Image (cartoon, helix red, strand yellow):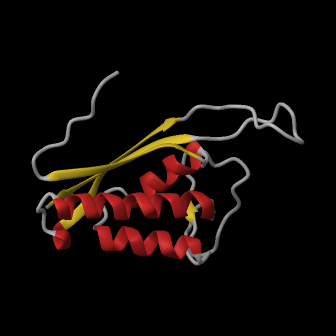
Amino acid sequence: MNKIETEPHQARALGKNMPISWKDATEIGRFIKGDEIQKAENKLEKVLEKETPVPMTKFDSDAGHKSGSGDSGKYPVKAAEHMLELVQEAAANAEHQGLNKGALHVDNVITNQGTEYATPGRFRGEKTKAAHVNIIVGEK
């Protein structure tokens, strides 16, 4: 297993087996990559309020056209909530390392599929979704 190295002017936050769709996490990562921390947080909060849709570029099946965005999109509220927490954690880690919080931007968002397991109970055989998300922030 490869260890992800960060440069001296970078910090990261890692979420393992987060109970969100890997496809939604990937699209949200594309949505916020390259943005400043404050702008990324504002975008995710607007997704939570269902004001701004996340454009679905690769995983766009069953994603209808949303007015104002120009593309097909969705409002993945649960995934946006978890990603917002990770962005805030990455910013806090960067601040702890002595980086300037005002100059931070999202360098990279890496998503991988998490462990699928069957849920016990009423719906036998139903699998849960999970994703590993790694957010790397850096100074400009």
Q: Is residue 100 left or right of residue 109?
A: left
Instruction: Give me the residue at 31% from left, 64% from top.
Output: 35
The image quarter containing residue 127 is top right
Q: Which residue appears farthest toward the front when viewing the image?
A: 121
Instruction: Give me the residue at 18% from left, 73% from top.
Output: 102
Q: How many marks?
A: 0
Q: Percent position (x, y) of residue 33?
A: 35, 56
Q: Percent position (x, y) of residue 19?
A: 60, 48
- The quarter of the rendered structure image containing the C terminus is bottom left
Q: Percent position (x, y) of residue 1?
A: 35, 21
Which residue is more in the foreground, 69 or 33? 33
Q: Is residue 89 left or right of residue 123?
A: left
Q: Which residue appears farthest toward the top when viewing the image?
A: 1
Instruction: Give me the residue at 59% from left, 41% from top.
Output: 130
Instruction: Give me the residue at 25% from left, 58% from top.
Output: 93
Whether residue 2 can be seen here? yes
The image quarter containing residue 86 is bottom left
Q: Is residue 78 above or below residue 67?
A: above
Q: Percent position (x, y) of residue 14?
A: 38, 46
Q: Which residue appears farthest toward the right when viewing the image?
A: 122
Whether residue 76 can be seen here? no
Q: Is residue 9 left or right of residue 46?
A: left
